Image: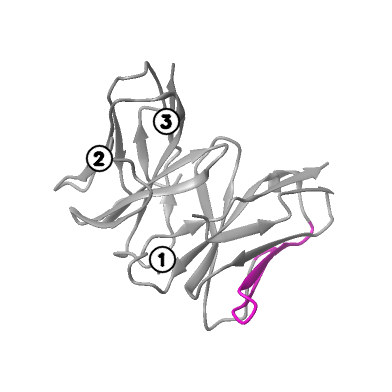
Amino acid sequence: SQQGEEDPQALSIQEGENATMNCSYKTSINNLQWYRQNSGRGLVHLILIRSNEREKHSGRLRVTLDTSKKSSSLLITASRAADTASYFCATAWLDTGRRALTFGSGTRLQVQP
Amino acid sequence: DSGVTQTPKHLITATGQRVTLRCSPRSGDLSVYWYQQSLDQGLQFLIQYYNGEERAKGNILERFSAQQFPDLHSELNLSSLELGDSALYFCASSVSSGRGNSPLHFGNGTRLTVT
């Protein structure tokens, strides 16, 4: 079953605008990661935020984590056409019986030039 | 380039057949993960190996099996194939033994088409 669910499922913006994607999850986590996938290609790791962190930055990316609400957001500032891709959150459960990353269903981002 | 190599890139086969997908992890990574991506099921975790031993099991069918060899490459075997097995199969690797403590590095996948 899916642990993380992204919202919205699809997002279309103009180049230069900011894009915000949200991820909600169900159980306590060890950390949360965001990945990008260009069409038909492998996923690329973007950022990892641990459960005791609230915010993390990497270039034009800003990730927040609210463990009380079991949610995370990914903000891409000043978007570019090259940011067009699907974005996935992935969670590592605290339950030791579930050690591998579980991915959400993704947000498809389209950045119009 | 993630450093993870998957072969073949494309595979077309018939129902009932058996195929083997191969993965070479990034240099230094001991964990190998297999994921299946289809339009209706999203990205599903199948199985993880760490240094040759099975570490975690996900939604892997009994018709599917995997192993990791002493040189750390891994193979995913799919047998008695059905039309619904058509999907992208990804291999990923990481330095850690699991619990999602480190990023995964994905290969570009094997696209399997069952006709």
Chain of the residue displaying label 3: B
Q: What residue is disc 3 on?
A: B85
Residue located at (36% from left, 36% from top): B6
Residue B65's tag is: 2
Of the residues shown, which amino acid type is indicated by label 1?
A: Gly
Q: What residue is disc 1 on?
A: B100
Task: Determine the secondary structure under disc 2.
Answer: strand
Q: Position of residue B16 (x, y in %)?
A: 31, 20
Q: Is residue A7 left or right of residue B6?
A: right
Q: Is residue B55 above or below residue B87?
A: below
The number of numbered badges drawn on the structure is 3
Nearest the viewer among A98 and B1 is A98
Nearest the viewer among B74 and B86 is B86
Q: Residues within 10 Å of mark 3 (few under 14, many from 20)?
A: some
* Residue B68 part of the magenta-drawn span: no
Of the residues shown, which amino acid type is indicated by label 2?
A: Ser
* Residue A60 part of the magenta-drawn span: yes
Mark 2 or mark 3, earlier in chain = 2
Q: CA distance from mark 3 to mark 1?
A: 26 Å
Q: Is residue B29 left or right of residue B103?
A: left
